Amino acid sequence: MRNLISQCTTSRSVADQIENVEDLSFVEDPTNLDNLKILDAAKVRKFVEEVNAITPEEIAGRTLVLAIGTGGTIAMKEHEVVGADGQKRKIKKPSLDFEDMFQKTESGLADEFLMKGLDALALDSSQMTYDHVHDLAIVKCYIEANINKKIAGFLIIHGTDTMAEASGHMAMMMGKKLRNPMVYTGAQAPIGKPRSDGGSNLRDALYTIKAMDADDKADVVISFGDGVVFAHGAQKRHNSNRNAFDSPLHELAGDLSTPGKLVNLVQWVRSRVEEASKPNIYGGYSHLLEVHSKMSESPQRVYDQIMHESVNGVILTTYGAGTADSEVVQVAAKAIKRKGIPGFACNPAALGAETEEKRKEQYESEAELERLGFRTVQSTTEIIRAKFELAIRRFRGNIAEVVEFMHGTNYIGEIPTGQTKRRSPLLRTA
């Protein structure tokens, strides 16, 4: 890491190179709805009024959960449209209806849970941006600051395409200490479709929130299929199997594979606090360029992309043995050195290595990458992206501090430790 830092400290701060200094800023007041970029502030205020109007008789001893809907496959419904050619056709669009969704889970859940929902977005998650996460974070903070009811936690209904990365950004924004758990879930098939996983995922997410509440825990996780996955280690692993998500570096936060068994959480799920960390909420576009080593990738194109003014860091995704096209690596190294920006490497195959010996074999070629300025980060690409966006703003573009934070600080558990690293088999997807 000394080579990386010495290389970077001789350069200007990235802040000197960014014309719009707001690109390196956080939201000053995370509870101020005036800071919303996309969502409807009036709708959020009305939702809080409705929550505050809930009577003890209505709660009737049930667990109160606040759901924030963003759309996704779980909420998809068919709509008939007329195309430009005059022909009618059916398309799928998210159409949130919390009462309808709740009714499509187990009937007994209504006796145990009271779920109040805010339809914040109706979005195909492939269209999710940092600005959407920015707004959802503000909404969550505003709700917490203004409700007069004790809640068990927040349920985030989300599409699967970007759930891993969006929840990772949310976890980074919320910081180390949370007042209430945030549990993401969704589905591989619309909840109204026969044999959809939507109902069971929604049920298990509610029980995950209840388990956290009972244990006085608060973390950001994904509850999906057979497992509860930490947002700081989550990856989407399958496009149709019920076990869409897993965490190749981290042990699961909880197991959902046994029917009838309550959710047991691992002991390192973070504890709930009364005074949460001040959230570091950001939006805008990514400052980090992800470069994949692909056969016959144009080195010149890679160089030109890195040299674009919007790029302030590079992550190089390698092949399974930790290798990458040498021409691509050489030009990428030249570009990051010229700009004075950091380079990181991620080996997706090594993330799932079963043993230290296997991981060591896969990492042998990474010495050359490090010599050229690319240091391997032991985290998923999803959380690396989120951590970099936090770091580049937190340290106002000071690259030496950014590099030290990326490699030397285990901010919310994103770097696996001897206790948290994955030892159990990955969830079945076949």
Image (cartoon, helix red, strand yellow):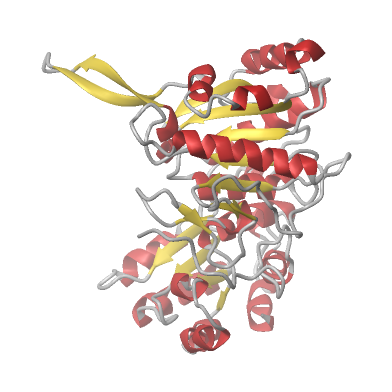
Quadrant assignment, res 371: bottom right
- Residue farthest toward the front in the current orientation of the protein: 260
26 is higher (above) or lower (below) than 327: above
Indicate whether 150 appears above or below 52: below
Residue closest to the eye, 23 or 173: 173
The image shows residue 300 at horizontal and vertical percentages of 33, 69
Q: Position of residue 397 (x, y in %)?
A: 68, 57
Residue situated in front as seen by the camera: 373 or 139? 139
Residue at 50% x, 29% y: name it.
105
Depth check: give the residue in front, 339 or 267. Answer: 267
What percent of the width, then of the height, locates residue 3?
64, 83
User: Relative to the observer, which residue lies in front, 263 or 151?
Assistant: 263
- The residue drawn where x is 50% and y is 38% is 200
Q: Residue at x 65, y 46 (%)?
A: 262
Q: In this rendering, is residue 173 above or below 237? A: above
- Quadrant in the picture for the C terminus: bottom left
**Residue at 35% in and 79% down:** 325
Q: Is residue 75 left or right of residue 281?
A: left
